[in-house]
Amino acid sequence: MQYMGGKERQARYVVEQLRKHGAGCTRYLEPFIGGVSIFARMAPDFPGAAAGADVHPDLSLMWAAVIDGWEPPKVVTREEYAALRNAEPSALRGFVGFGLSFGGKWFGGYASNNRGDDFCGAARRGVLRKAAGMVGQRVTNADYRTFNPGAGTLVYCDPPYAGTTGYAGGLFDHDEFWHTVQRWADAGAVVLVSEYAAPQWAESVWAREAVKSLRKDSNTLPATEQIFRIPADAPLPAVA
């Protein structure tokens, strides 16, 4: 399933850094699971002790449902897609809103099969494949600020990047985010964050040039995808 901002292409690098820096941790937390490209790979390392969450209600409902055995449909019509756009949050709406939309953008336009592409089938197979790595784990609909991980917890965050659009919970406060992950690190958690840039006190442990596309019809811009480790006791200015 396509998911805007997903980490499928960088997954092996992210997982490598998480396993390297999280050696010895007994719990795993991922509060921005998105398309679960990382969570589905990391959860098996923490049997019964991995927790994933997302603030998007339909997305979190979908992943929780497939973990419990729900299977997405094999076919979704254009009419069904349109009807679900304004429906109540549900696992089906989460699957359709992302999986059957161009570029994985939430209800960004029905991806038809006019050229023979089986978008629904491909999304369904992708969701079920990822679900296999999450059996027995917990996924909830929650804002990252509700968590308080401490010592022994490995935390991976893939928040909305600065300068990009969208957050299901409203405008994303990046200053508050960095203060929050700093607090987690101060409490003993091992915290890694994916972003293009971070405050000077965050340690870049991996970097790779990527291509950042603003729109499908626009030019692309180079960007450096990075993974930052959050140090404990870093000096931070007060949040206004």
Image: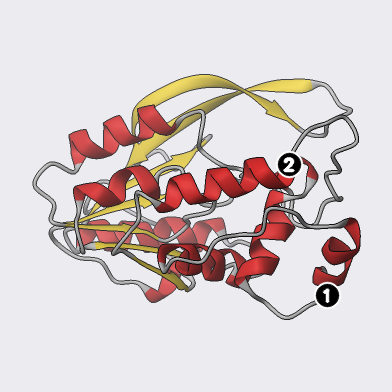
Q: Is residue 234 visible?
A: no
Q: Quadrant of the N terminus?
A: top right
Question: What percent of the width, then of the height, locates residue 55?
Answer: 55, 68
Q: Mark 2 points at which residue?
A: 119
Instruction: Determine the residue positioned at 51% across, 58% down.
Output: 175
Q: Specify the color scheme.
A: secondary structure
Question: What percent of the width, then of the height, locates residue 4?
Answer: 66, 44
Above or below, 62 relative to 142: above
Instruction: Determine the residue positioned at 82% across, 68% down.
Output: 85
Disc on res. 220: none
Question: What percent of the width, then of the height, locates residue 64?
Answer: 46, 68
Above or below, 38 relative to 222: below
Q: Which residue lies furthest to the bottom in this view?
A: 88
Looking at the image, residue 150 sits to the left or right of residue 218; the answer is: left
Circle 2 packing at 10 Å, graded few (<14), some (14-19), many (20+), is many
| Residue 76 quadrant | bottom right
Circle 1 packing at 10 Å, graded few (<14), some (14-19), many (20+), is few
Q: Mark 1 points at which residue?
A: 86
Element assignment for label 1: loop
Looking at the image, residue 22 sits to the left or right of residue 135; the answer is: left
Looking at the image, residue 1 sits to the left or right of residue 130; the answer is: right
Mark 1: amino acid: Asn
Q: How far is the residue under mark 1 from the one under mark 2?
A: 21 Å
Element assignment for label 2: helix
Mark 2: amino acid: Phe
